[in-house]
Amino acid sequence: MRMIRYTLLGATILLLLTDSIAAGRWYTDDQVKNGEKLFSENCASCHGQNAEATQNWKQPGVDGKYPPPPLNGPAHAWHHPMNILRRQIRIGGIPLGGSMPPFKDKLSAKEIDDVITFFQSKWSDNIYQQWEEREAMMSKAQGN
């Protein structure tokens, strides 16, 4: 009986710890929840409610521009380090020939990070790990 109590206590503590940091990732569950709200309000109309994007996102539209890519893992967002993800949201895609508006006057730096946590929370563990490794390499190359 005592062993069962200790097992349950250990499992409860583990659940409490994992609730504060999302599965070993850099962000908290609260950031994901806030990011989901912000994403829904600012990004979902183009990138999809679950960051799944539009059909045929790899094909340019009649205007010659590509539609918004999925941010939930299968596209290229995970190839970009954090500073590029932040910059892309801040300045938008128009300077690069895209259609994404800038959010620098609409979202704070913290809110931008929260948006990123939301779509990163959709990434599989494998994709997140690859992003994390790329992030570490970029940081090391920059001397950080």
Image (cartoon, rainbow, N blue to C red):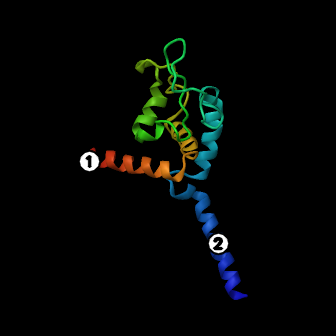
Q: Identify the residue at horizontal 64%, vertical 72% (top origin).
A: 11
Establish if 133 lies above or below 43.
below
Residue 47, x across and y down, in percent? 59, 30
Residue 13, x across and y down, in percent? 62, 70
Mark 1 surroundings within 10 Å by alpha-carbon count, few (fewer than 14), some (14 through 19), many (20 or more): few
Looking at the picture, which amino acid does disc 1 mark? Gly
Q: Is residue 49 left or right of residue 141?
A: right
Q: Quadrant of residue 138?
A: top left
Q: In this figure, which residue is indicated by the disc labeled 1?
A: 143
Q: In this figure, which residue is indicated by the disc labeled 2?
A: 11
The answer to which of marks 1 and 2 sits earlier in the sequence is 2
Q: Identify the residue at horizontal 43%, vertical 46% (top origin).
A: 131
Residue 25, x across and y down, in percent? 51, 54
Identify the image quadrant of the N terminus. bottom right
Looking at the picture, which amino acid does disc 2 mark? Ala
Mark 2 surroundings within 10 Å by alpha-carbon count, few (fewer than 14), some (14 through 19), many (20 or more): few
Q: Is residue 3 left or right of residue 108?
A: right
Q: Identify the residue at horizontal 41%, vertical 21% (top origin).
A: 96
Dot 1: element: loop
Instruction: Identify which residue, 5 or 66, lies in the foreground.
Output: 66
Q: Identify the residue at horizontal 58%, vertical 42% (top origin).
A: 118
Establish if 130 lies above or below 75.
below
Badge number at residue 39? none
Is the Cβ of the residue at disc 1 closer than 8 Å to that at disc 2?
no
